[in-house]
Amino acid sequence: MNDSLKTLLIVAFLILILWNLGAGLYYMLVDKGETKRTVNALTKRIGLSVALILLVMLAIWMGWIEPHGIGG
């Protein structure tokens, strides 16, 4: 797996997480507690966050990515 594909996958996960966070905020303001769309959007966000963390842990364990310090 090349570096640009790894970066693209992580960025795609982050964009989906932010999208669901924004959707949850929008539904909270528009629906005023009448539907479960806010809960569903925030549940998806939590699921995506957990999936991203597990994916990064798997990638480190498999040797696909190597953690490093801030300086590099």
Image: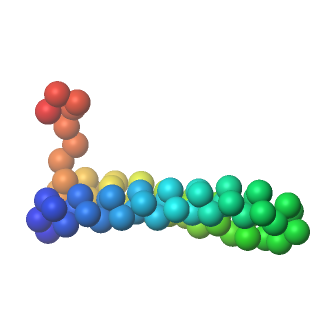
11 left or right of 6?
right
Residue 39 picture quarter: bottom right
Residue at point 16% right, 62% down?
A: 4
> Residue drawn 79% across and 70% down?
36
Q: Could you tell me which residue is drawn at 59 percent across and 57 percent down?
A: 22
Residue 19 x %, y %: 52, 62
Relative placement, left or right, of 24 versus 32 is: left
Q: Quadrant of residue 5?
A: bottom left
Which one is nearer the viewer's eye here, 29 or 59? 29
* Residue 14: quarter of image: bottom left
x, y percent for residue 61: 26, 56
Q: Residue at x 68, y 56 (%)?
A: 25
Q: Position of residue 50 (x, y in %)?
A: 50, 58
In the image, 72 versus 58, the foreground residue is 72
> Seen from this angle, which residue lies furthest left?
2
Answer left or right for 27 relative to 6: right
Q: Is residue 33 left or right of residue 62?
A: right
Q: The C terminus appears in which quarter of the rendering?
A: top left
* Residue at the front extreme, as displayed: 30
- The answer to whether residue 58 is visible is no
Q: Nearer the viewer, residue 4 or 65?
A: 4
38 to 25, vertically: above or below: below
Q: Position of residue 7 (x, y in %)?
A: 23, 58
In the rendered image of this protein, does residue 68 appear above or below residue 56?
above
